[in-house]
Image: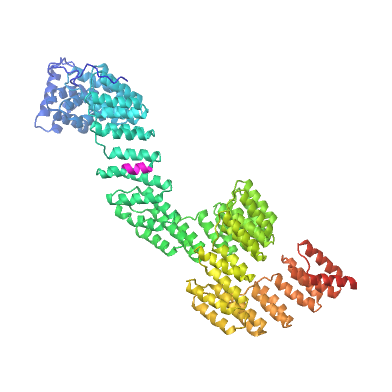
Amino acid sequence: MKLTLSQRRVTSLKFHYKRRNLCTHRPFYSDNDEKESQFIDTLEKIIRGKQSWKLALDDAVLSTALKPHHVEKVLIQTLDDSRLALRFFNFLGLHKTFNHSTASFCILIHGLVQNNLFWPASSLLQTLLLRGLSPKEAFDSLFDCYEKFGFSSSLGFDLLIQSYVQNKRVADGVFVFRLMREKHLMPEVRTLSGVLNGLVKIRQFGLVLKLFEEVVNVGILPDIYIHSAVMRSLCELKDFVKAKEMIHFMDSNGSDLNVVVYNILIHGLCKSQRVFEAVEVKNGFVKRGVKADVVTYCTLVLGLCKVQEFEFGVWLMNEMIELGLVPSEAAVSSLVEGFRRKGKIDDAFNLVNKLGPLGVVPNLFVYNALINSLCKERKFNEAEFLFNEMKQKGLSPNVVTYSILIDSLCRRGEMDIAVSFLGKMADEGIKATIYPYNSLISGHCKLGNLSAAESFFEEMIHKGLTPTVITYTSLISGYCNEVKLNKAFRLYHEMTGKGIAPNSYTFTALISGLCRANKLTEAIKWFDEMLERNVMPNEVTYNVLIEGYCREGCMVKAFELLDEMAGKGLVADTYTYRSLITGLCSAGRVSEAKEFVDGLHREHCKLNEMCYSALLHGYCKEGRLKDALGACREMVERGVNMDLVCYSVLIDGSLKQSDTRRYFGLLKEMHDKGLRPDNVIYTSMIDAKGKAGNLKEAFRLWDIMIGEGCVPNVVTYTALINGLCKAGYMDKAELLCKEMLASGSLPNQITYGCFLDYLTREGKMEKAVQLHNAMLDGLLANTVTYNILIHGFCTMGKFEEATKLLGGMMDNGILPDCITYSTIIYQYCKRGYLHEALKLWDSMLNKGLKPDPLAYNFLIYGCCIRGEITKAFELRDDMMRRGMKPNKFTLASLNLASCSK
């Protein structure tokens, strides 16, 4: 494309003007018949006269004789009053349903244009084109009339081109332009700019450049709109060298070179991510005497956002604000969203606040996204501030805004406020969707408020909302957390019955619930069901199942699952490691747990305080305080800081070993690190002192605890009550229990168990039974409380009452454990009732209970006493196969029985 101006200039767009009188043209129709000439004169008189056209033209002779060529002739003769000619033309069409010729249309179009009546001319042209004429037919018809009747204005052709462009037929407009060129006609600059800009819209950039070259070569000086179209084309073609040449060309030829053209270049550069070149163009404005406008700055800001230069974008925005320019919503939205996506939430929030007084805010989508990010960053005050400011800034919160805030409030446990926001939605006429209901149901389930969750579930169904897998999974998870497995599985079957497929979270909730209920076998079946349904387990699923195996002591299977998890590309986390460490420690394999921790450290696996606290607990449980302290030192060296839980474990361990020096040393170390004992640590210390009989020290710690602002909980009260009961201070224990109730803490099974234990030890079985019956009524009785009563009756020799309790506890839905059976088996053996003891033993095994060493020792002793030596040795072998060893007393009994035999 040559950007040189031809020496030939067009001074007038009326290229084919013919100076001829409209009355002296060569007749278009044969006018030999005098009657026909008189007929036309009659028509013209009617048109120009005051007589009613309707009455005059209703004449049967006149109406029948009227033909299109008559109308053409009349129109030619009345063009001195083109409005009158148009009225006549329309009258015939509307009232006489007259079928006008194409020539009549063209004559009238040219006549109207010649009298500057462009709007009716354009309307008439649109009607003509509706007849289905091709662009060539339309042009030829217009040109024939134009040439034969010597019209002085060629703007009728401009209207034709403009009509095609407006109707998105730009190619037809270009075709007409070519036909005009062939006839030595040239459209107006305004028409040409319309064509070029129309071509830009349909992305015909090459054709724009070609037409522009033709326009320049015939000597027409393009206007700003033509130059703009060419600049856009060059920028879209990424030919920025020629785009800059175009600016130089415009400048050298005195064209109107304003900021609009520069903005197009800047936009093109930014679109091609050549933002800093665009900034250089803007920086040269002062030298060229051009003033940057809002478009300039906002285009640059948007471009900088695309290349992640948000700080520079803010700098430019500040500059435009100083110049009194107000940034656009798009520019602000782009910057805010950019900062948000980059994790710079504070910068995004500050920018919104800064621009608020100017009345500029990001769009609602970005505003909602920022509120959501602030909620995720736990910047709730800032999120609520933005929400409260929305209406003042001209934005109305929508269902998405409310859903985000309701979800945030539910995650924080602020359910009352979340529910009030649901009410606000209704007040503002915003129809709630499934999302806020899902949040409310999930929030209530996590807090254990299942009745409220069920209420919202029913409400959403009543409102015609369809529950999703998320809705059902939240409720299922809630039921599983409360070990209400029947309701959880009923809901699961309801969900699948409706064709809603469970996801990994649904199965994980069910597996977790089964593991909590110690139903590991069923949990494994559901894990297999999950795989059969092609639902892939996630890390949480494996963590739950690994924890279940660890709780059952199945460490081999737990580690197999860890390997399986890694094989599927799932990454174990601190939750996984903590379960495995705890499992090893619970199985008495603390040294292996330590080796496992060291191996993880060598593999650069991240461990946290919870993992180490599990190991410390394992050491302290075995009385290996020194090893625990050594593990602490390694823990700190590895970059994991001691937290309150770790100190709590160590303090508890030192108290159990009566290591006062170490105990005070740990307290001092905590104090030096700015850590204060919490109620867990205080409870541990109070419990240790109470069990040691040092109640004075226990109450002193109690006073310090309250003085430090730590509120005693049910465990703390129970620890002190236990100490008082064991020391025989029943009155003081009862008084403390009343104080506990007054403080809002409700006694639990362990609290009542302390009183129960005291009563049975003192032989006050009647009162003990009364207390236990009250516990049954309050659903507080459990296996432990039954065991205390059974042991009490056995100690007093009331064996029949003890065996009755065994039956009674099963009637009340409370399952006996190994201790229950061991206690009664011992009494049977002691009385020589070996057959009954063995029968009870088989009953225990059939219920899936695993005998402990004490139970084996009792029964082996009973067999030895009754001379059942073979059975005694069978039990010993079974015991050893299970990894347990007989105690010295049992071995002595076996040896003695062997010798006697």
Image quarter in which the C terminus is found: bottom right
Residue displayed at 66% across by 58% down: 549
Magenta residues, dominant SS class = helix
Give how far across and how far down residue 677 sits, in percent: 52, 68
* Residue at the right extreme of this rendering: 901
Instruction: Tell me where the magenta segment starts and ends, as one range.
Output: 310-316
Magenta region includes residue 314: yes
In the rendered image, the vertical position of residue 722 relative to residue 229, given as above or below? below
Image quarter in which the N terminus is found: top left
Q: Quadrant of residue 271?
A: top left
Give how far across and how far down residue 209 sits, in percent: 32, 23
- Nearest the viewer among 687 and 96 is 687
In the rendered image, the vertical position of residue 279 relative to residue 424, given as above or below? above
Colour scheme of the picture:
rainbow
For the question of whether residue 101 can be seen, the reply is: no
In the rendered image, the vertical position of residue 318 relative to residue 87, given as above or below? below
Magenta region includes residue 581: no
Give how far across and how far down residue 845 sits, in percent: 75, 66
Tell me if 477 is positioned left or right of 309 in this view.
right
Q: Quadrant of residue 194?
A: top left
